[in-house]
Amino acid sequence: MDKKPAVIEKEAQKELELLRAPAPAPLVPLPIEVLVPEARQQTPAVRQRATRPDARLHGLGATKYIDDMYLPGMLFCKIKRAGIASARILKVDTSEAEAMPGVVAVITGKDVPCNSFGPSLKDQPVLADERVFHAGDGVAAVAAVTEQIAAEALEKIQVEYEPIEPVLDPLLSLQLETPGIHAPSPNIYGHKVIKKGDVQKAFADSYKVYEGQFRTQMVEHVPLEPHSSLATWDANGRVTIYSTLGRITLGRADISRTIGVPMSRIRIVATIVGGNFGGKNEITTEPVVALLSKKTGRPVKCTFTRPEEFTSSTTRHPLIMDYKTGVTKEGKILGRQIRLVLEGGAYCSWSETTLGKACILSAGPYKIDNLYAEAFVVYTNKTMTGAMRGFGAPQVCFAYESHMDDMAKDLGLDPLEMRLMNALEEGSLSPTSQKLHSVVVKESLLQAAERFGWKNGNGHGHGNGNRQ
Amino acid sequence: MKRRGRGIACMWYPIGFTVAANPSAAVVKINEDGTATLLTGTVETGQGSLTILAQIVAQELGIATDDVHVVSADTDTTPMDTGAIASRTTYVTGNAARLAAEKAKNILFEVAAPVLGVKPSQLECADHKIQVLGFPQRNMHIGDVADRARGVNGQPPIGSASYNPATVALDAETGQGKPFATYVYATQIAEVDVDDETGEVEVLRIVASHDCGTPINPMLVEGQVEGGISMGVGFALEEEILFDKFGRQMNPNLTNYIMPTSLDMPKIEVDIVDSYDPTGPFGAKGVGEPTCVSTAAAILNAIHDAVGVRIHSLPATAEKVHAALKAKRAQEARQITAGAA
């Protein structure tokens, strides 16, 4: 085929260009970020599966937790635990520990300027001074040049106790007359009622009335990183505390109160925290390291051992839950009566919040016009309970959902259908008569059932239990 | 013999404190290059909340998550926050961060409006630009506007705001009132195998369908759900602090306090329910605590479905399930004997 000369010339030029050496690369550094925008670099930002900026550090093991921090001249603190659930402290002798080489300072509850704190009731000491309320109470604290010496010094501290019969059963505590464990305060330190409609009439109108009692246990948060804090004072009398606290603003108020230093002279830095789950919502070692650091003029660090994490931090409230529910023949709930007893352990901590949430949520995500829910929280001489992921909700959910399945089985109903029949809807009134918005109980039930293959009978059929 | 069973459990859970004020404050500073800094007093405790807050600020300013640096958890530099508690960070701190970003953004709108020849109310932020509503081609780069705000108008774009959920106190006698601003809802379904000779329970699969309003970051929502389920599995089957008769803990260590490891985890399938809360930042509510609420209930209902025994107290250890199976068999044997007689 004939080609026009101009075209041939153009093609020849193209070939020449191909043979020419490539232009030198511009003298700029290589891009350090990927060229294709990742989720973190895209707009709009909401709904992006953006990675966390700290993920890389965690992945490389480069994250610095408080236990990885060392300041020049830093001392290590260990706390002596009572090991007895209930006693009067007659005498604490720290002289032998103080005489040990490497021990720089020892403090007891008497050295704490204001030895009480707590989110609602100020019933908890920093270090027990007159009375031990549970075995995990601290009675003295040592600052030494090494962790080993501090631990050995604890063995040399002599504490004389006058044992007091501990109260370990929450139902017994509920019955005990005042004065109670924290005399003159009563053992029942929180009570809540949610009342709506007429439960007795609803039971009378019911086709059947079901009852059940459910109990839950005490569990720990078990964060990978235990509680830790490090205090250091400057020459102007200002203290900086690095802490695993999840709530620094209120933590600072508690530290200010207990060590008697104005808030303007306290700086709290919460570093990256290795797990919280509600367990790091209040002060633990912070006042102790601040006072030891002040006494010694050196930075002081304290990290809980794993056993201390169990015995001396908060735990989840064990609950005893009595449910009584009246239903129609079709499975519609007419009325429900609930009684909850929360075991608070030795101190109030976040019991008030747990009591309130457990009581309000105890009816479940259901439309119940006639309701009577009553909840008590009592002291015992066991490990203190406090905030933990769900504030009483996992406990009451175990009860109301077990109860629901028992009723469904007896009525010959599909557990899914019985829930759908009673579920809250947009605009439903809650147990406290709050008009609810953006309610999606039914949507979540149907979505989960669809994904699971509930209606196809998935997971069902081998057993001899709740068969349809 | 292993017997298969399934159990369903749904739940509701509130966001924020019960009636009590639980405010958050936030400060947003827009830099001269169009990136931003958020100051917040909340603490990152592993859940990814600082990433969520960065995404909320970025969304308000039309920039990317990576463009927002978050300074947190220092009482000397960051504003008041009630903290990482009560599943409140996305909703409460998120609302404060969004309002602070909006205030800083309004300064940029004041600066850009005369340049673009429109009123501030006719502007929007999108894709690193401040643009005229309906006429996106009429725009300025957010960095140019921020630089102009400082260098020409003398008004650095900084916003601060606080937020506290709206509640109404509960009546002392009846408990009636509005304790929380909003709630989330969820369902979990568990599939288990129960060994009817040993009582051992193996959780095979959990399907979780959770409402969190708008998922600001679906990956972090899934992470929370998976973590919550692992806590729920431990609560259902293994974990328990035991006391001796003197009130001392018997198992305060990870040798004798048994909790689920990765090998004990079931297959987890997470769905996010389509939902929007007009009171939350961009429709978001929260997700932290609710993820562990219904797991134990679903597992215990599945045990009941598999072998027909109702365990009334947690945890449902193999010993407890075995004892319940034994009691059930003894009762059935008595019924057969009575029937024969």
Image (cartoon, coloured by chain):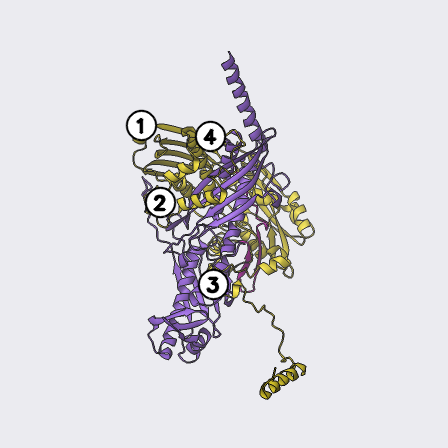
Of residues A99 and A452, the one nearer the viewer is A452
Q: Are marks 2 and 4 in contact (CB under 8 Å)?
A: no
Q: Colour of chain B?
A: purple
Q: Amino acid at mark 2?
A: Glu
Residue A89 appears in which quarter of the rendering?
top right
Q: Secondary structure at mark 3?
A: loop
Q: Are marks 2 and 1 in contact (CB under 8 Å)?
A: no
Q: Earlier in the sequence, mark 1 or mark 3?
A: 3
Which residue is under mark 4? A172
Is A199 drawn above or below residue B70 in the view shown?
above
Q: Mark number for residue A45?
A: 3
B78 in the magenta segment? no
Of residues B142 and A294, the one nearer the viewer is B142
Badge 1: residue crowd in 10 Å (few <14, some 14–19, many ≥20): few
Dot 2 and dot 1 within a common chain: yes
Is A272 drawn above or below residue B292 in the view shown?
below
Q: Which residues are magenta?
A: A217-244
Tag nearer the camera, 1 or 3 = 3
Q: Chain of mark 4?
A: A
Which residue is under mark 1? A204
Q: Are marks 4 and 3 in contact (CB under 8 Å)?
A: no
Query: Is residue A185 something one can see in this rendering?
Result: no
Which residue is under mark 2? A425
Q: Mark number for residue B328?
A: none
Residue sitting farthest toward the right: A101
Residue sitting farthest toward the front: A1
Query: Is residue B328 something one can see in this rendering?
Result: yes
